[in-house]
Image (spheres, grey):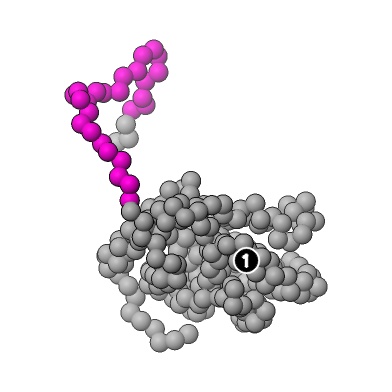
Amino acid sequence: MGKKTDKLGKAEYYEKLAPLELELNDMARWLQHTGQRLLVLLEGRDTAGKGGAISAIADTLNPRQCRIVALPRPSDRERSQWYFQRYVPHLPAAGEIALFDRSWYNRAGVEHVMGFCTEAERAAFLKQAPTFEKLLAEDGILLFKYWLSVDQDKQEERFAERQQDPLKRWKLSAIDVKAREKYEDYGRARDEMFKATHTRHAPWTLVDFNDQRRGRLTLIRDLLDRLPDHQVPEVLVDLPPLGHAPRKERFTGALKPIPPFR
């Protein structure tokens, strides 16, 4: 990795995030206005910060327009399908944003390193992925692929935090524990994946996520800068005076609200 920068504090992070959130909402209006489709793939090692980056993008957007795609392990039926088939229904329609928390690149990473696919299946994937993505780009989908990079010392810190924090233990799996011993294997798999799938129509963008807050800001800034000018006049909904005194919500019959939390 390059030269480390000082870790960004929480207050400064939210101060810098606020104007980006406004721009993200401008982007969402532009997508609705133009009917463009935005597809963002976030890949990286365990603990890199994919979920946090996706939340930073999606938190202030309309969830009906901005969808997060985090697929579980494939079913037996899905394993018998063409590999890309299970991902196609989740591609964005006109005006939509689809944020993939891992994607079809599972095959080139965790499936390959952990032995969940054959070498022939991985080879087929590396051959087909550029063609699949070229079809998406030719159909007009705006496709962005980000790799969130993290050094192993930071990865170990985050694994330990997950183990100690009862609210984060769900993030730590037996596969994660096994993957700790395969850091170099994952690096080789990543490099082979980049060599086969870093194309003119769907290039990879690397973002340093050793500092997750700074990484989120960097990723969002890059995404916004690579889109066309997305300023669309905002149509404000008129909110006239109520016309009467505010009323309390009233209930009839036996149903009553439960006592408030104390």
Quadrant assignment for the C terminus: top left
Q: Magenta residues: mostly which secondary structure?
A: loop
Q: Examine the structure image and report whether residue 183 is included in the region drawn in magenta.
A: no
Q: Which residue is mark 1?
A: 138
Q: Is residue 153 above or below residue 98?
A: below
Percent across and percent down for residue 237 are 31, 41
Residue sitting at x 33%, y 28%: 259
Secondary structure, mark 1, is helix
What residue lies at 36% left-to-right and 60% top-to-bottom? Answer: 231
Q: Which residue is situated farthest in the top direction here?
A: 253
Q: Is residue 49 left or right of residue 199?
A: left
- Identified by mark 1, the residue type is Glu
The residue lying furthest to the bottom in this view is 3
Q: Is residue 126 visible?
A: yes
Q: Magenta segment range?
A: 234-259
Residue at x 32% of width, y 31% of height? 260
Q: Quadrant of residue 247?
A: top left
Q: Residue 3 placed where, x, y %?
A: 40, 87
